[in-house]
Image (tube, rainbow, N blue to C red):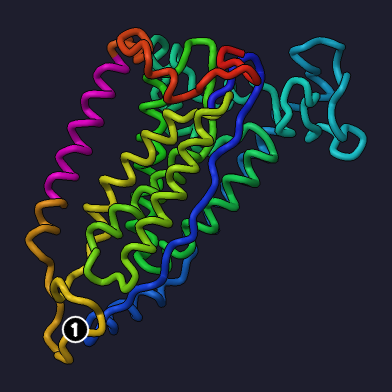
Amino acid sequence: MATGGGQQGKAAGYYQYPASYSYAGAAAAAAEEERRWWPWLVPTVLVACIAVFAAEMFVNDCPRHGSALGGGAGSGCVAAGLLRRFSFQPLRENPLFGPSSATLEKMGALNWAKVVHEHQGWRLISCIWLHAGLVHLVVNMLSLLFIGIRLEQQFGFVRIGVIYLISGFGGSVLSALFLHSNYISVGASGALFGLLGSMLSELIMNWTIYSNKAAAIITLLFIIAINLAIGILPHADNFAHIGGFASGFLLGFVLLARPQFGWMERSELPQTNQPPKYKLYQYVLWVAALLLLVVGFVIILVMLFKGKNGNDSCHWCHYLNCVPTSRWKCDT
């Protein structure tokens, strides 16, 4: 989520992981064993994000510091009598019930100038854990629960944790490359889109074990399209969405492959005790995805730390982030 002039946007929606597949024979036993994973990583991430948001509001201290729009200390703070120093900035400054842009920047929000010119690369990681407001936090955490719990149950905390963190970093890197110098970006949207992307590549990688292939891929593609379309609205950082999605999509090929019996429907699988094996196409996709991921990260990071801004060499790319209409502008 990118902001400018103290305004924040929200993350995209969510998708529930399809459960319409199973194995036969040894594959069924393996799948059943994987479903016994107890999901603890996703709840831990959720608690961590809530704790960081509480820290944001503690540091923000609206009654003491006031609003960037003027009015004096404590003027316009939302729920100041009840929340005291945890009260929100005035809604005209932050409609998402959250801190000021200055507080977010102080606590590690993504800022192109600080990353490139002040060598604060750590902001590429810290921004993933920050949220622009209570609304932003709730939307992202609900998305995390719907996406992450089922994935962690199926594949375990190690693989899902790696996808979440690297996708979040990938979203931050691409966002920073196209971020205007006077804007900041925060939120877990890139990491969440990474989990969404990994679902698509997992479906492709494990195509033969889905019982209702067409319904699964149509549903997933529809949800992805809706979420990316939300990103073209003002104040939503669609480059973080795209970067996170691309990273998660490639990582899904690398980390979420399952052994296969062959190109046949589940009902036609032979009753055998022979274990399933990885197929040649899975190895090919694994190698190709890993190469693309590494090369992509190297190219974008080199461009970023050389001080390049993607908007300078791609004059139409800003339409991927926001499409101006008669109802809103993209440069507010």
Seen at 14% across and 81% down, the residue is 275
Question: Does any portion of residue 1 appear in the rendered image?
Answer: no
* 35 to the left or right of 303: right
The magenta stretch spans residue 207: no
Q: Is residue 332 above or below residue 52?
A: above
Q: Is residue 162 above or below residue 146?
A: above
- Where the C terminus falls, by quadrant? top right
Seen at 70% across and 40% down, the residue is 134
Image coords of residue 218 (percent x, y):
38, 56
Seen at 35% across and 57% down, the residue is 217
The magenta stretch spans residue 303: yes
Q: Which SS does the magenta portion mostly show?
A: helix
Image coords of residue 45 (percent x, y):
52, 51
Question: Does any portion of residue 210 appear in the rendered image?
Answer: yes
Image coords of residue 162 (percent x, y):
34, 50
Q: Which amino acid lies under the numbered mark 1 shown in the image of this protein?
A: Leu
Seen at 17% across and 75% down, the residue is 264
Name the residue beneath numbered marker 1: 269
Front one among 59 and 15:
15
Image coords of residue 304 (percent x, y):
32, 17
* 59 to the left or right of 200: right
Q: Is residue 160 above or below residue 209?
A: above
Front one among 107 and 305:
305
The span picked out in magenta is: 286-305
Quadrant of the image occupied by residue 178: top left
Quadrant of the image occupied by residue 281: bottom left
For label 1, the SS is loop
* 173 to the left or right of 146: left
